[in-house]
Amino acid sequence: MEELKELFLQRRKKAEELRRKGIPIYPNSFRVSHSVEEILTSYGNHSEEDLQALPELFSLAGRLMRLNNFGKAAFCHIQDRTGRMQGYFRRDKMEETSQEVIRNLDIGDIIGVRGKLFRTRTGELTIMVEELELLVKSLRPLPEKWHGLVDQETRYRQRYVDLIVTPRTREVFINRSRTTTFLRNFLTDRGFLEVETPMMQPIPGGATARPFKTHHYTLDMELYLRVAPELYLKRLLVGGFERVFEINRNFRNEGLSTQHNPEFTMLEFYQAYATYQDLMELTETMFSSLAQELIGGKILEYQGTRLDFTPPWKRLTIREGLLMYGELGEEDLQDHQKIFQYGKKLGMELTDHEPLGKVLVDIFEKVAEPHLIQPTFVTEYPIEDSPLARKNDRNPEVVDRFELYIFGREIANAFSELNDPMDQRERLKEQVKVKAGGGEVAGLVDDDFLRALEYGMPPAAGEGIGVDRLVMLFTNSPSIRDVILFPQMRPENPEKS
């Protein structure tokens, strides 16, 4: 800490010296003509003779990442949003102001350079700096170049530094942006309309999760940050928007882990006149096409495991998973007492009042989920675990629903939508009763949503996809915090500031 403080003071002194000599240290007059990528793409194959024949001067700005000073000359690396490029200074060829700037430069400063292109003796394309301007004086030193930012917590908390010094981090978030752009275009090309629905809702509907609560003073009413956009998107189906989607935040007041952040990004979409089986095919196409876009094929490596996105994917029912991976027989699945005993044996906290179907799903998640490594659609969920899904026509004890698992993690959840308002009212009432009995924040029945259903919602299917977890897969990131720019953190330890 003392060393960092001393370096901070040294840089402050340099900044004051430049100011004293009338050299601005935070100007905003320099204009860029090219990015690093544009220069390397357009002139990377030019010979030295071709470069010398170019009449133009190139203006480049970025952060100083290396500076080797040899007295009368210096080499540097300048990093902008597109990459790094070498610069070369010759003091005897530069104005006094630029020479003064060079004497007070530090790694991390943001500079603007202007000059012609040439190749060094090693053949590296370099800009011969004729004019140098200090654009920002960096007062804090960057992490030591050979080790980078190695402390994981500091990487998450000071993401701005992580992005400067860790190329891998920049690549992750560039690919995150490419992913959301792809998803948006994929659905738009299929006739889906992108919409926005409320973040603050009077009733936390659409998922069984603990919400964040706030208060609106003008209206004098309690509001909840949304746990899901589902009920509002279905209202749009009623209104005649037959294909809608939203990519946005959900908020759930629950735990932190490598797979959970209280604020996370979901893609949720609904298609009228479609079933959950239609969405299985759509999801296979979406994900395999995304793999082709990001990695150039349908097979990727995640944390040392080969994942194959080539359709069709495996299908597995809840019942099949329990029989295959649990210590249960066919007759046990209807034995309430035996199921509860088995759940308690697995360490589940049960009161013996939970619906049997819900307990079966919880057991499935414990015993079967870790085995679902390759993309797998899990189907035939019990009706007690799916209050918003349509009953199966052949077996009314289960619903037309799937969850997609990859690498033992839930990535997507979809079902044919329940559009019977009377059935929906009874199931929502039952859901509220279970939530209240379990000590959670008691939900309310969304009467406006039920009123919308009474106008008539077309038969439809809907799906939610966890964008953060999807990006984890395609960037080979072990933690959800690696793919969220500013993940939620506990209060900072002052010693790490």
Image (spheres, grey):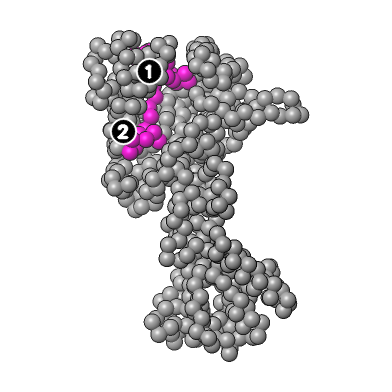
The answer to whether residue 383 is seen in the rendering is: no
58 within the magenta span: no
At 42% across and 65% down in the image, what residue appears? 146
- Type of amino acid at the residue the image marks with label 2: Pro
The location of residue 466, given as percent across then percent down, is 45, 37
Q: Residues within 10 Å of mark 1 (few under 14, many from 20)?
A: many
Residue marked by disc 2: 370
Check the image and report above or below for 492 versus 340. Answer: below
Query: Looking at the image, is mark 2 or mark 1 earlier in the sequence?
Result: 1
Question: What stretch of residues is rendered in magenta?
Answer: 384-411
Q: Residue furthest right?
A: 218
Residue marked by disc 1: 359
The image quadrant of residue 381 is top left
Q: What element carries label 2?
A: helix
409 within the magenta span: yes
- Type of amino acid at the residue the image marks with label 1: Val
At 38% across and 27% down in the image, what residue appears? 402
Lateral position of residue 473 relative to residue 57, left or right: left
The image quadrant of residue 114 is bottom right
Check the image and report above or below for 432 versus 470. Answer: above
The location of residue 124, given as percent across then percent down, is 42, 78
